[in-house]
Image (spheres, rainbow, N blue to C red):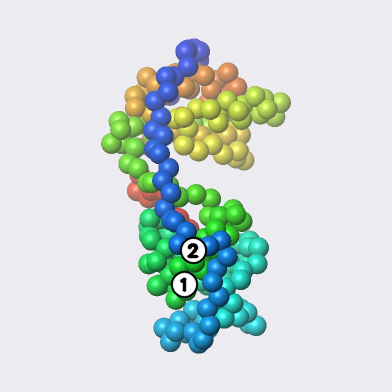
């Protein structure tokens, strides 16, 4: 389903759902230190902590994080937010046996470390008429990438673009409302090189998160 005639730019038709925030701080920027023994229910979390690491109910201070330094409490907070990004901080706190300010501080640090990259609404784009999902393979010469990357980032109908191995250098996932719009886009892409287009009939596994 490849074409060769260049045409006008596609009018902006892509779904751009408004991103929603999903948590609020419930205390100061510095978490309040808790004292006393850990709740009995938290023994399962405590036993999973790395050897020599104090549980957070003894010290609410956390170091700068990366994905290799997350403790079981961080991972549980992330799993809760992945399931429902609008979960109130108070409810998260009750599940991980921490104070609300301590949970807010942890979420803030996870964001600053780039581990939590945002909070988004998951929208069924088909309800807005985007019934055409297509995967496009594209040849792009190395000396064209400086021009190609800004171009492809500016196309709202592109869901994802990956540089890949094989006969084609790019794999582009797109959604469109009509095949005519897809036709226009393919012709624009052929400015860079040869294309090969696959239109999806159905999706058996939707985008999902990996285990944390």
What is the x, y in percent for residue 131?
32, 33
Q: Is residue 201 above or below residue 210?
A: above
- Residue at 37% x, 50% y is 205
Identify the image quadrant of residue 92.
bottom left
Quarter of the figure with the N terminus: top left
For mark 1, give the secondary structure.
loop
Residue 27, percent from left and from top: 49, 63
- Whether label 1 touches label 2, CB < 8 Å: yes
- Taking depth in this image into account, of 45 and 196 the one nearest to the observer is 45
Disc 2 is placed on an element classified as loop
User: Height in image: 72 above or below 88?
Assistant: below
Q: Residue at x 50, y 27 (%)?
A: 155
The residue that mark 1 highlights is 99
User: Badge 2: few (under 14), some or many (20 or more) residues near its Cα, within 10 Å?
Assistant: some
Q: Residue furthest left?
A: 127
Q: Which residue is mark 2?
A: 27
């Amino acid at each position: 389903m490849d074409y060769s005639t260049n045409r006008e730019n596609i009018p902006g038709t892509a779904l751009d759902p408004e991103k929603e925030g999903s948590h609020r701080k419930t205390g100061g920027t510095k978490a309040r230190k808790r004292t006393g023994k850990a709740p009995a229910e938290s023994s399962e979390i405590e036993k999973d902590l790395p050897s020599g690491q104090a549980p957070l109910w003894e010290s609410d201070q956390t170091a700068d994080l990366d994905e290799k330094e997350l403790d079981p409490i961080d991972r549980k907070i992330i799993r809760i937010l992945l399931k429902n990004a609008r979960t109130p901080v108070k409810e998260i706190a009750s599940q991980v046996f921490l104070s609300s300010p301590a949970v807010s501080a942890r979420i803030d640090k996870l964001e600053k470390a780039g581990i939590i990259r945002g909070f988004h609404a998951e929208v069924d784009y088909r309800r807005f008429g985007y019934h055409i999902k297509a995967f496009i393979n594209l040849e792009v010469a190395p000396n064209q990438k400086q021009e190609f990357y800004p171009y492809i980032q500016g196309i709202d109908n592109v869901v994802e673009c990956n540089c890949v191995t094989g006969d084609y250098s790019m794999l582009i996932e797109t959604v469109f409302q009509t095949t005519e719009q897809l036709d226009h886009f393919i012709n624009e892409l052929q400015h860079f090189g040869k294309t090969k287009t696959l239109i999806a009939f159905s999706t058996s596994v939707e985008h999902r998160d990996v285990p944390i």
